[in-house]
């Protein structure tokens, strides 16, 4: 009977349904909302409980926070694009490296230093500008932006997911960072081999609108143009330092995850408006742009879907099913984070739901062997997140480039599989010490 299907199978079937619905004219936010309703009812939530869950997560602080962050990102990106600042960023960087593929990869990597949900939306216009003179499909542009946006999240300490996993593992943060650092290099290498090299070398730097002033390649001019990014990172770092300093004297100033991004974005937005001398009427036009609404609805739909996944206990059921099927220990350590990554589409999601279960399964209690299992579990969860159809960055990138969600998986699959393969080899290598 259908009702006897394991929850893991039900969840996968709902994902397939969502993907199938994206082939229709329905907006992705509608598809995800339908998926949330179907999954909630199928897993066993009463209609009243499901409605309550949807309403609760609709007005939840995390949803409102994400909406504000994504809206500010879109507004700032639009202002930077309309004022020509995005073109100048790409122009100045291209004058330094003179290869559009490098520019297309470096811009999302630079933005990737910002721990902001949906940050891929910030770099998407830069990638679009970098490849505007090359014959590159929308799907390839989307995947380049998406992949290189996430090369730091294995160890970069500003990411809440990294902080969470270090706390759960109860290890020194620099120990975790040292073990995870090589994964960024491998991720870059996988992106170069499977995403950039097939494009062929492009020396075409005449990719900017007519009238764009070309500079002499000065690094300082480039830094000035990327100052909004530096401001956001700087404010986040300043908030972190203030919080740490307050903690040393017994004052708890810890902010909810992601909140520190908002003041940085606000300051950067003022900087962009002031340095580009944007008129007030133009500011009002961007702030009231209806194109922001579909992206906001998409963010809300993702949060509702994730909320139903949590409130229906679907992730807990999936964990229980995998353990009860007596999978080999190492497969459980890999499979649970991977599935949690696919289901939640966010690092905190798979770390928070999977690591409390798999950490007790690690054969070692400390040392390099302990971290080798943590690394393996983290990479599998991370790749599950990267392949998740509810990953916010994936969806906003796909929407920005008007790319097909299904066709994006074609170029994304090989680099993802290569990361999984390397994590296994790396695991074996670490266990030799």
Image: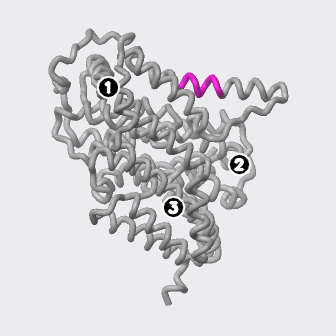
Q: Mark 2 to mark 3: distance in Å?
A: 25 Å
Q: Which residue, given by chain and number where applicable, does mark 2 sit on?
A: 168
The quarter of the picture where residue 186 lies is top left
Q: Position of residue 302 (x, y in %)?
A: 48, 56
**Magenta stretch encompasses residue 334:** no
Residue at disc 2, secondary structure: helix
Q: Quadrant of the C terminus?
A: top right
Q: Mark 3 to mark 1: distance in Å?
A: 33 Å
- Mark in the foreground, 1 or 2: 1
- Bounds of the magenta span? 233-239
Query: Quick check: marks 3 and 1 in contact, CB under 8 Å?
Result: no
Q: Indicate whether 47 appears above or below 286.
A: below
Q: Position of residue 263 (x, y in %)?
A: 57, 28
Q: Which residue, given by chain and number where applicable, does mark 1 sit on?
A: 86
Residue at disc 3, secondary structure: helix
Q: Earlier in the sequence, mark 1 or mark 2?
A: 1
Residue 344 visible within the image: yes
Q: Around disc 2, counting alpha carbons within 10 Å, would you say few (fewer than 14), some (14 to 19), or many (20 or more)? A: some
Q: Which residue, given by chain and number where applicable, does mark 3 sit on?
A: 305
Q: Nearer the viewer, residue 388 or 299?
A: 299
Q: Is residue 209 left or right of residue 174?
A: left
Residue at disc 1, secondary structure: helix
Q: Is residue 118 left or right of residue 348?
A: left
Q: Mark 1 to mark 2: distance in Å?
A: 40 Å
């Amino acid at each position: 009977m259908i009702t006897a299907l394991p929850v893991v199978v039900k969840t996968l079937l709902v994902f397939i349904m969502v993907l199938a619905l994206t082939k229709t004219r329905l907006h992705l936010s509608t598809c995800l909302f339908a998926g949330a309703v179907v999954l909630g009812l199928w897993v066993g939530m009463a209609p009243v409980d499901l409605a309550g869950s949807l309403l609760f997560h609709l007005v939840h602080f995390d949803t409102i926070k994400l909406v504000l962050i994504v809206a500010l990102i879109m507004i700032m990106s639009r202002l930077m694009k309309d004022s020509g600042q995005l073109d100048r960023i790409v122009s100045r960087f291209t004058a330094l490296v003179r290869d559009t593929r490098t520019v297309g990869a470096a811009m999302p990597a630079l933005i990737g230093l910002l721990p902001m949900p949906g940050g891929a939306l910030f770099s998407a216009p830069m990638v679009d500008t970098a490849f505007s003179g090359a014959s590159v499909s929308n799907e390839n542009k989307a995947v380049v932006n998406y992949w290189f946006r996430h090369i730091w999240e294995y160890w970069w300490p500003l990411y809440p997911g990294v902080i969470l996993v270090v706390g759960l593992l109860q290890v020194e943060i620099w120990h975790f960072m040292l073990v995870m650092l090589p994964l960024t290099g491998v991720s870059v290498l996988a992106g170069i081999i499977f995403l950039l090299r097939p494009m062929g070398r492009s020396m075409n730097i005449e990719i900017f609108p007519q009238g764009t002033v070309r500079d002499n390649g000065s690094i300082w001019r480039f830094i000035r143009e990327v100052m909004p990014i530096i401001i956001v990172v700087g404010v986040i770092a300043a908030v972190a330092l203030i919080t740490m300093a307050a903690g040393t004297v017994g004052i708890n100033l810890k902010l909810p995850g992601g909140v520190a991004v908002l003041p940085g974005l606000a300051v950067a937005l003022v900087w962009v408006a002031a340095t580009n001398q944007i008129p007030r009427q133009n500011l009002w036009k961007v702030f009231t742009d209806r194109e922001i609404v579909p992206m906001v609805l998409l963010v809300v739909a993702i949060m509702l879907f994730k909320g139903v996944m949590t409130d229906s206990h679907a992730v807990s059921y999936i964990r229980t099913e995998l353990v009860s099927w007596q999978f080999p220990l190492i497969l459980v350590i890999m499979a649970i984070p991977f599935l949690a990554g696919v289901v939640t589409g966010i690092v905190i999601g798979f770390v928070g739901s999977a690591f409390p279960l798999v950490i007790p399964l690690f054969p070692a209690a400390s040392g390099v062997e302990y971290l080798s299992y943590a690394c393996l579990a983290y990479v599998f969860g991370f790749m599950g997140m990267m392949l998740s159809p509810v990953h916010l960055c994936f969806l906003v990138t796909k929407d920005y480039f008007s790319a097909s969600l299904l066709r994006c998986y074609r170029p994304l699959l090989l680099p993802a599989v290569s990361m999984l393969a390397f994590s296994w080899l790396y695991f074996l290598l670490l266990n030799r010490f």
